[in-house]
C-alpha cells in the first residue's frame, strides 16, 4: 500500500508540473507556433529511503500551439441617461460612449475611434439640432481636457484654475455648450482609447493630412449612422486641434462633400512656419500682458486695462520693435538705445538683459528671467502660474508650473467619470499623451490656405478664434498675424472674428474666462444657422 500511495503521489506531482508548464506557455508572447515542455518524472516503484537522493528521468514533450490571431475590432457603445444644470436650465441628455471602426474602401478595418456623444433629450427634430465635434491637439493628446472642461460635467478647480489635491470632485458644468449644440468628444488615433487596427502601420495615421482624413471618415460615419446630415455642423478644436480643424474644413468638403456651419479655433496654432524674428515679434505682446498681470510695470501702464496693455504690446512689436529687427546692425546708437528702453518699459526686463539678448528674448529663457529675482519661473500654457527651478540661475524651466498644477486633476476625474458615470468598463490603457512621432508635417504650411479655400467656397462658413492673453504654447498674436495674411475677400473676411480671455491655453480652467467662453461660443453657434 505504501508503494501504491507513493506512485499515486508522484503521478499527481507530474500532472501539476505539466499544468504549470502549460500556464507558462499561456503567458508567453503571442505567435509562437511550437513550445517545448520539459518535466521531471519522479515516479518509482519503491519508496526512497531517507537521506538518499532520488534519481530523475527527464521527459521532453513537444506540443503544437494554436497561432495567436488578434480579433478584428468591433463597434461598441454604452448608453446612459443624465441631467445637469447648464446655462441656467436643467437639461436631460443621453451620453453614448463607444468606439466606431473606420475602414478602407475594401471594408478592411483600419482603426477604432473612441468617442463620447452628448445629445439633448426632448428635441422635437433632432435632425435640425446643431452638432459639434470636439477634440484636443498635441498632436498626440487625448481629448480628456476639453471633455472635462467643456462637457456637461467638469473638474472642480480653484476660481483661477489651480488644481487641488485628491480626492477630486466633478460638478455640473454650467458653462458647457450642450445648451446650444450636441457635443461629440473624440480621441485621435493612438490617443485615449482610440487605436489602430491590429497589423496596421501607424504612419498612415500620423500626419497633418492623414490625421484629418481619418477624422473625416469618423465624422462621416457618426453623422450617417445617427441621421445628422441635416444638422448644422461645427468643429471645436484646441491647440493642434485647430490645425486639424483647418485641414478638416477642406477634407470634409472634398472627400465627403460635407459643409460646415462653423469652426471654433480655441488657443490656435499660427498655421505657418514664421522666421525667427517674426516669432519674437509674436511672443512680445504676451510678454507685456504677463508683466502687467504680475504688477511689474510702471504705475501709468498698470492703470491700463488688459485689452489696452495688449494693444500697446502689439503696436510696439509690429512697429518700432519690428523696424529695429529689420534694420539690424544699421540701427543708429540712438535708435538702439530707444528700442531697448521702450522694450524694457513694456516687458519689465532689464535693459542690460535685452542688450545681452540682442533684442531677441526667446520664450524659453523668458520663463526663467522675468521673475528670477523671486527665484520663480513662469508657466508655458498659462503665464499666470509660477513655480521653482532647482537652480534659480538656470536658463530654462524644469517643468511647466501651469500644466503641473491641474493635469493630475483632469486625468483622475476623467478616468473615474468614464467608468463610474458613463459605465465604460474597458481595461485598455487610456493614453493621455501618445508618441505619434514621426509626424508627417506635409501640408502644415498650407492649412491656412485650406481654410481660406473652404470659407470661399462655403460662403456661409463662419470661424471664431478664441485666444488667451497668457498663452505661450500658442501665443494670441501669432494667429492674429495668420488671419490678417489669409487674403480673404471682404465678403468672406466678415465671417471670421476673435474673442479674448484673461487666461492661458486652457481657457475653461478659469471661472471668469469659462463664463465668457460659454457666452461667446453659444452666441457664435446660434448665429451660424437659421432657427
Image (cartoon, grey):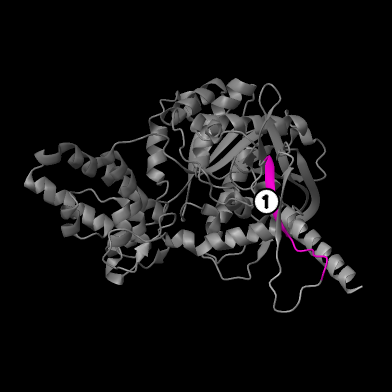
Q: How many marks?
A: 1
Q: In the depicted view, which residue is nearer to us: 404 or 268?
A: 404
Residue visible at 29% across and 64% down?
Answer: 299
Image: 234 above or below 313: above
- Residue occupied by mark 1: 428
Does the magenta run of residues contain 487? no
Examine the image and state in which quarter residue 352 appears.
Answer: bottom left
498 relative position to 230: left or right: left
Q: In the depicted view, which residue is nearer to us: 517 or 51?
A: 51
Q: Is residue 161 visible?
A: no
Disc 1 crowd rating (10 Å Cα; few below 14, some 14-19, many 20+) is few
Residue visible at 59% across and 34% down?
Answer: 262
Residue 38: x and y, percent? Answer: 69, 53
Residue 165: x and y, percent? Answer: 57, 71
Q: In the depicted view, which residue is nearer to us: 412 or 521?
A: 412
Q: What is the quadrant of the C terminus in the image?
A: top right
485 relative position to 79: left or right: left
Query: Helix, strand, or loop for circle 1?
Result: loop
Residue visible at 78% across and 60% down?
Answer: 14
Query: Which residue reaches farthest bottom?
Result: 50
Image: 215 above or below 365: above
Q: Is residue 368 visible?
A: yes
Q: Which region shows up in magenta?
A: 33-46
Residue visible at 40% across and 47% down?
Answer: 475
Amino acid at each position: 500500500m505504501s508503494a501504491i500511495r507513493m506512485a499515486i503521489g508522484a503521478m499527481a506531482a507530474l500532472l501539476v508540473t505539466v499544468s504549470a508548464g502549460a500556464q507558462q506557455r499561456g503567458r508567453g508572447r503571442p505567435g509562437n507556433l511550437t513550445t517545448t515542455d520539459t518535466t521531471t518524472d519522479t515516479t518509482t516503484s519503491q519508496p526512497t529511503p531517507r537521506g538518499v537522493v532520488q534519481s530523475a528521468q527527464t521527459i521532453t514533450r513537444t506540443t503544437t500551439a494554436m497561432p495567436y490571431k488578434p480579433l478584428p475590432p468591433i463597434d461598441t457603445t454604452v448608453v446612459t441617461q443624465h441631467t445637469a444644470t447648464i446655462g441656467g436650465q436643467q437639461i436631460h441628455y443621453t451620453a453614448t460612449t463607444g468606439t466606431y471602426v473606420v475602414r478602407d474602401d475594401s471594408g478592411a478595418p483600419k482603426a477604432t475611434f473612441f468617442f463620447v456623444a452628448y445629445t439633448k433629450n426632448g428635441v422635437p427634430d433632432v435632425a435640425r439640432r446643431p452638432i459639434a465635434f470636439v477634440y484636443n491637439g498635441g498632436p498626440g493628446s487625448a481629448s480628456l481636457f476639453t471633455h472635462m472642461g467643456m462637457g456637461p460635467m467638469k473638474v472642480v478647480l480653484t476660481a483661477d484654475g489651480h488644481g487641488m489635491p485628491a480626492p477630486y470632485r466633478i460638478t455640473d458644468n454650467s458653462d458647457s455648450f450642450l445648451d446650444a449644440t450636441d457635443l461629440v468628444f473624440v480621441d485621435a488615433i493612438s490617443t485615449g482609447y482610440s487605436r489602430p487596427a491590429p497589423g496596421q502601420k501607424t504612419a498612415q495615421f500620423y500626419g497633418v493630412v492623414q490625421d484629418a482624413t481619418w477624422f473625416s471618415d469618423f465624422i462621416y460615419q457618426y453623422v450617417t449612422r445617427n441621421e445628422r446630415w441635416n444638422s448644422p455642423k461645427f468643429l471645436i478644436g484646441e491647440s493642434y486641434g485647430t490645425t486639424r480643424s483647418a485641414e478638416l474644413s477642406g477634407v470634409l468638403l472634398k472627400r465627403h462633400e460635407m459643409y460646415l456651419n462653423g469652426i471654433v479655433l480655441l488657443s490656435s496654432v499660427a498655421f505657418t512656419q514664421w522666421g525667427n524674428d517674426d516669432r519674437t515679434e509674436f511672443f512680445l505682446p504676451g510678454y507685456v500682458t504677463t508683466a502687467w498681470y504680475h504688477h511689474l510695470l510702471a504705475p501709468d501702464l498698470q492703470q491700463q486695462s488688459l485689452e489696452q496693455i495688449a494693444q500697446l504690446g502689439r503696436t510696439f512689436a509690429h512697429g518700432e520693435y519690428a523696424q529695429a529687427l529689420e534694420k539690424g546692425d544699421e540701427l543708429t546708437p540712438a535708435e538702439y538705445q530707444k528700442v531697448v528702453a521702450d522694450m524694457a518699459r513694456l516687458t519689465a526686463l532689464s535693459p542690460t538683459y535685452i542688450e545681452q539678448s540682442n533684442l531677441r528674448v526667446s520664450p524659453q529663457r523668458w520663463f526663467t528671467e522675468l521673475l528670477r529675482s523671486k527665484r520663480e519661473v513662469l508657466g508655458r500654457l498659462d503665464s499666470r502660474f509660477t513655480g521653482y527651478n532647482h537652480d534659480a540661475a538656470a536658463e530654462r524651466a524644469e517643468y511647466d508650473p501651469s500644466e503641473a498644477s491641474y493635469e493630475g486633476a483632469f486625468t483622475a476625474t476623467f478616468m473615474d467619470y468614464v467608468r463610474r458615470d458613463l459605465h465604460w468598463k474597458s481595461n485598455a490603457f487610456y493614453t493621455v499623451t501618445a508618441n505619434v512621432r514621426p509626424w508627417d508635417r506635409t501640408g502644415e504650411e498650407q492649412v491656412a490656405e485650406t481654410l481660406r479655400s473652404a470659407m470661399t467656397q462655403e460662403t456661409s462658413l463662419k470661424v471664431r478664434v478664441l485666444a488667451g492673453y497668457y498663452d505661450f504654447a500658442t501665443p494670441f498674436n501669432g494667429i492674429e498675424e495668420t488671419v490678417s495674411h489669409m487674403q480673404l475677400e471682404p465678403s468672406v473676411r466678415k465671417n471670421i472674428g476673435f474673442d479674448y480671455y484673461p487666461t492661458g491655453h486652457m481657457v475653461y480652467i478659469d471661472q471668469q474666462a469659462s463664463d465668457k467662453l460659454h457666452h461667446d461660443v453659444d452666441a457664435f453657434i446660434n448665429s451660424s444657422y437659421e432657427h
